[in-house]
Image: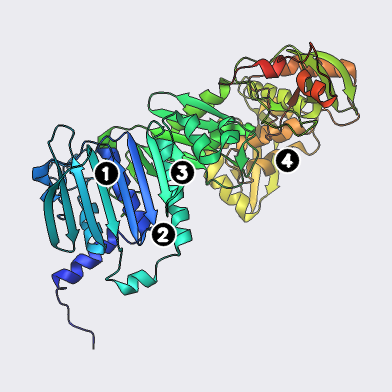
Amino acid sequence: MPSPIHILPPHVARLIAAGEVVSRPLDVVRELVENALDAGASRIDIEVDGGGLERVQVRDNGSGIPAESVPLAPARHATSKLTAAEPVGAGGLEVTTLGFRGEALWAAAQAGTLELTTRPAAQVGAARLYAQGDEVQVSRTSAPAGTTVTVSRLFAHLPARLRTQASAGAEVRDITALLGRYVLHHPGLHWRLTVDSDPRLTHAPADHRGAVATVYGPLSANRVLTLDTGNVRGVVSRPELTRARRDRMHFAVNGRPVTAPPELERAVIDAYAELLPAGTAPLCVLDLTVAPEDHDPNIHPAKQVVALADLPDVAARVRAAVAQALAGHPLVRAAPALIAPPEPLPTPTAGHFPDLTLLGVYQELYLLAQGEGDLWVVDAHAAHERTLYERLSRELGEAAPLELPAPELLHLTPEQTAQLHERGAELRGWGLTIENFGPGLARLRTLPAALAALPVPRLHELVVDTALSGGPDPRREVLARLACLPALKAGMLDPERGALVLAALRECEQPWACPHGRPTVLRLSERDLAHAFGRRGVRDVARGRDSVAQG
C-alpha cells in the first residue's frame, strides 16, 4: 500500500529547498560573486579551502549592507533587489540584477555556517552576522567598507550529501572555470582567486582582450578582434584560432554569464561563413544587452539559462556584429615559421587586400608575390575557387531561372525527400525548383541560369545532391562545390594565369579564404627571412607585417 500524503516537517523542507540553491561549493561561489557584482564592487577576492567544503570566502569593496538590514540578510526570500509584488516573470516584472530571489545567504546558512561582515562607506562601524540554520546572531565590529562573506563546514550536518560531493580537485577546477567566465564578462574589475593559500587566478582591470589573456593566455589574446555595436560587445577570434568544440564560446545577457541557446552559437559560426572550416568553432566572448522586460532569468535553478523574448532577432544582431568585426580586418594568416620564434607571429588588423606583384610560380600550383614589403604565397586553386564562388554568387539572382526543356526525373533517398519537404521553398527562392513526384521520386524543373552553362560533368545530379545534403546553407554549399570543380588544379598554372588570379582575388569581397574555409594566402615578413639566415644589419628593422600595429 502506498504511504499517505503528509506535510513535510519545516526543518526537512528547509533542507530540501536549500539543496536546490546550494548543492555544491560551486553554487556558493556563484551566489556570493553575483551579490558582490550587484553591490557594485570593483575588487572581488575569492578564497577556497578544501575544495570549498571547508571554507569559501568572498570579499568585495561594494556598497555594503546597512546595519539595520543585516538581521534580515539570511532570511529566506529577503532581498533588496526586487520591489514589485508580482511573481518573477509575470506582470512585466523587470529583473535588473544578477540575484533577485533572496535565497543565497539563507541557503548557505542552512547548508553550512555563514559569517558576514559588512559596512557601507558612509556608515560608522560595521555589522557582523553569524548564522547557522535558523540561529542568527548580530554584533558590532570594525571593518573596511564593503562585505566579506564566509561559508564554512559546508554539509557537515548532512552526511549523505557530503559523501556525494566531487573531489576537491574537481570542484576547484569547476570553480576556476566559473570565475574565468566572470572575468571574461566583467573584465574591468580586479579579480583574485586563492585556493588553499595558493593564488590561482589574478586579473587587473582591462578590456575583453585583456580578460582573454588572463583566462586563455596572451597567444589567444593576440588573435582576437574586438566588436562593439552597442547591444553586442566583446571579442571574437580570428579564423586561425579555432577548436573542435564550442567550449570557448561564451555569452552573457545583461552581465549574467549564461549557457547560450544553440541559436546564438550558430549565429556566430554562420557569421564566419567559409572563413571557418567545417566542424570547428571560434573563441568568442560576447556581452548581449536586452531590455529587462525582454528576458526571464528565472527558468533555471542556477540562473544559467535565460529565456529571450525575441531570440531570432537577438541571433540576427549577433550574426551581424560578428560579420562586421570580421569584415573590418584583413584575415591573412602568417606563413609557417622558418624557425621557432620566441613570440607569436603578429598579423595585420587593419587595411585591405594589397596590390601584389607576381614573382613566380612554384610547383605549378603556388604563386609567389611581393607586397607591402613582405613575401606572399598564394594557393592558386583556393584563390581561383574564391573568385569563381563570388562571381557565381553575384550572377545567381541576375537572371530568371532556366526552365528545363524536359523535367529531369530524380531518385531521392528518404533523407533527401525529407530535406526537399523542408527546404523546397528556400531552394525555389534562388532558382532551383524540385517537385515531389511520388515516393522516392522528384522532378527537376528549373535551374539557376548562372549555373546552367557551367562545364561540370553531371551538373544536375551534383546540384541536387548538394542542395539536399542536409547542410546548414544549401545555397552556399552548392556554389562552393561548383566553384571548386573548374578551379585551377596543380599543373595548370603559369605566370599569365597567375597574374589573372591575383587581379581577380584583389576584387573579392572576402579574399582571405576559399568557400570551404582554407586560407588563400600566407604571408612571410623579410625580418623572419633575415633572422632565419642569421642576417643582422641595417635591413633588420620592422617592416611589412612586422610594422603593423596590433588592434
Q: Name the residue beneath numbered marker 2.
A: 51
Q: Name the residue beneath numbered marker 4.
A: 462
Q: Which of the two residues, 73 or 253, is positioned nearer the viewer here?
A: 73
Number of other residues with Cα within 10 Å of mark 4, as a class: few under 14, some 14 to 19, many 20 or more: some
Tally the numbered discs: 4
Amino acid at the residue labelled 3:
Leu
Q: Describe residue 386's horizontal placement relative to residue 103 as left or right.
A: right
Which one is in front in this view, the residue at disc 1 or the one at disc 4?
Answer: 1
Counting residues from the start of the chain, the first of labels 3 and 2 encountered is 2
Number of other residues with Cα within 10 Å of mark 2, as a class: few under 14, some 14 to 19, many 20 or more: many
Q: Name the residue beneath numbered marker 1.
A: 35
Amino acid at the residue labelled 4:
Leu
256 w.r.t. 490: above or below: below
Look at 78% across and 21% down and name the residue there.
Answer: 376
Q: Secondary structure at mark 1?
A: helix
Amino acid at the residue labelled 2:
Gly
Counting residues from the start of the chain, the first of labels 1 and 3 encountered is 1
Q: Quadrant of the N terminus?
A: bottom left
Amino acid at the residue labelled 1:
Asn
Q: Secondary structure at mark 3?
A: strand
Which one is in front in this view, the residue at disc 3 or the one at disc 4?
Answer: 3
